[in-house]
Amino acid sequence: MTEPQIEPQSVGVVTPATARFDDVLHLRSGGRLDGYELVYETYGELNAARSNAVLVCHALSGSHHVAGRYADEEADSGWWDNLVGPGKPLDTRKFFVIGVNNLGGCNGSTGPRSRNAATGRPWGADFPFVTVEDWVDAQARLADTLGIDSFAAVIGGSLGGMQALSWALQHPQRIRHAAVIASAPKLSAQNIAFNEVARQAILTDPDFHDGHFYEYGMVPERGLRLARMVGHITYLSDDAMGEKFGRNLRHGKAVYSYEVEFEIESYLRYQGDKFAQQFDANTYLLTTKALDYYDPAFAYEGNLTAALAAARAGFLVVAFTTDWRFAPARSREIVYALAHNGCDVSYAEIDCAAGHDSFLLADPQYHAVLSAWFDRIEV
């Protein structure tokens, strides 16, 4: 029986939860965590068969706060609030949705800001390197805690899409569908280069103190600001920048200074300042390296088809025409490899002017594709 149509609604006020794990987590880097915590949020209800769970994986600057709002923050909704909720593409009347803050994060899960039991001080730069595969392993343990043997779907955009793909390879029996959005099977050399420039901005900030700036009561704001500015340029398309800012001058004429004159300069500085006040420098370094390292085909001499042979899930792969950081050609590589393994895969290339950030927006065509795909998932 078809659910009656309703106007899309917010999931409302939400409260994060924390799961504690005391078993050792061995990491791909050779490091280990003897105990750790994951902060997560859930929306909707887990059905009696425990078959309607959907995991949402976040991108670089995302978190567990996917949808809804906190009681003391009226206007600050989750980062994918336009997608998740009653009557929205990921409908919480049908699905039980989970968002998790990844290990190494700065939004409550164990990370560089956390206390290292061995030293009694924050981990800082001593926090071990984590990979996409490590995040998936930790998410699987959370699923065990919640009594979820199999996800109806795992979905993510950008770095989150890499996690969705990795879920299908690491735990093929525990995932029935995967949505890989605005993502890639590995970073290009150009993408790694952008990440390195951003990292160097942080590493060379005098307030970074080799990653132990917490002990000095400092924050490497200049480095974080520059890192975000570099990153943000790659998230937008040239057309989007031109339409939104053009060459508009704040004062209507050139004043010949190095202060903010063009509107695009003002926008980038605002984004940089905001990010530097909210995000952790060590988390930024760890996360960009996880992006750089991800390459499931590496162990198969670069053969992506061979790398994806373990996948059993049904796939939706979505790309955006103006996304030059994770171009549609990279998504088509995934589709090609899945199709040649006989996987059930659908592909949508959305004409949206916003560049890489398109996956965060409520574009009607994009949301229609997601709605149709989720409607077909049986729980």
Image (cartoon, grey):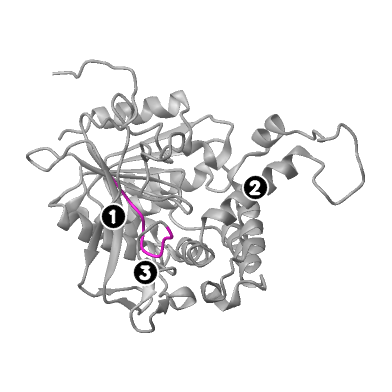
**The quarter of the displayed image where residue 71 is located:** top left
Q: Which mark is residue 332?
A: none
Give the extent of the magenta segment. Answer: 98-106
Left or right relative to 82: residue 95: left
**The quarter of the displayed image where residue 369 is located:** top left
- Under tag 1, what secondary structure? helix
The x, y position of residue 16, in whole percent, is 30, 49
Q: Tell me the residue at 29%/68% (across/down).
A: 36
* Residue where numbered disc 1 is placed: 167
Q: Is residue 294 above or below residue 361?
A: below
Q: Which mark is residue 299?
A: 3
As drawn, the residue found furthest toward the left would be: 48
Mark closest to the chain's N terminus, 3 or 2: 2
Left or right relative to 263: residue 116: left
Q: Is residue 253 above or below residue 129?
A: above
Q: Tell me the residue at 79%/40% (across/down).
A: 262
| Residue 266 among those drawn in magenta | no
Q: Is residue 129 above or below residue 148?
A: below
